[in-house]
Amino acid sequence: MLAQGGHVTPLARDTLAERRVTIVRDGIDPDAKDLAPAADVRTVAVAGDHTSIALKAAIVRHLRSQGRAAHDHGTSTSDPVDYPDTAATAALAVARREADAAIVIDASGMGSAIAANKVPGARAAMCQTAALARYAREHIGANVLALGATLVTPEEALAVVDTFLGTPMQEARYIRRLAKIRDLERRPRS
């Protein structure tokens, strides 16, 4: 983070670029405020594959009982569904700002996390505990929670969901890191 009024010499700029260090100017990055996940989560996109039906239904009921809008992006049958499809649907809702956060579910949570992370603007973390959920939000600014339906009980999952949605991200140093992630998304592929 470069303080307002700070200056970077051409040699320093070249050295930083060589070392792949991104300069974020304090108060100048117009998108910085939009990088942190929503602190007051009112709308949640929820999606899961065929292994998630019972857990997804419990989470949707729980969110709605809290007064949150829970948009169920499916699936609702035991017919096989590919987790990249369901995860992408919920992650896109967050990236398009149609939802403040998303929850994606498959058997392990790992595949949905990987798929959601392919959507620019989505930052997914697979969390099995409330402690991981707190770190995912507070330190890495995750806006998509991935859960493994076979790895957590409904009670454990609801505790993870509550922690994830209730933890804000506020420190500038963490937002600076999100700017670096954003820059990685924008980097041309070679």
Image: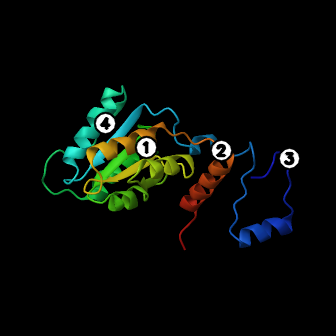
Q: Which residue is mark 4?
A: 71
Using the image, determine if residue 23 lies above or below residue 137: below
**Which tag is nearer the camera, tag 2 or tag 1?**
2
Q: Are marks 3 and 1 in contact (CB under 8 Å)?
A: no
Lower sequence index among marks 4 and 3: 3
What secondary structure is marked by label 3?
A: loop
**Mark 4 touching mark 2, by CB under 8 A?**
no
Q: Residue 107 versus residue 77: which sits nearer the camera? A: 107
**Pick the front one: 32 or 112:** 112
Foreground: 54 or 5? Answer: 54
Residue in the image at 71% along x and 71% along y: 19
What percent of the width, then of the height, locates residue 69?
35, 30
Q: Amino acid at mark 4?
A: His
Q: Helix, strand, or loop for circle 1?
A: helix
Q: Is residue 67 left or right of residue 2?
A: left
Residue 37 visible (yes or no): yes
Q: Please, is residue 157 above or below residue 100 in the view?
A: below
Residue that badge 1 annotates: 94
Mark 2 sits on what residue? 171
**Mark 1 or mark 2, which is nearer the start of the sequence?**
1
Amino acid type assigned to the residue bearing label 3 in the image: Gly
> Mark 4 or mark 1, which has the lower sequence index?
4
Answer with mark 4 or mark 2, whichever residue precedes in sequence: 4
Q: Are marks 2 and 1 in contact (CB under 8 Å)?
A: no
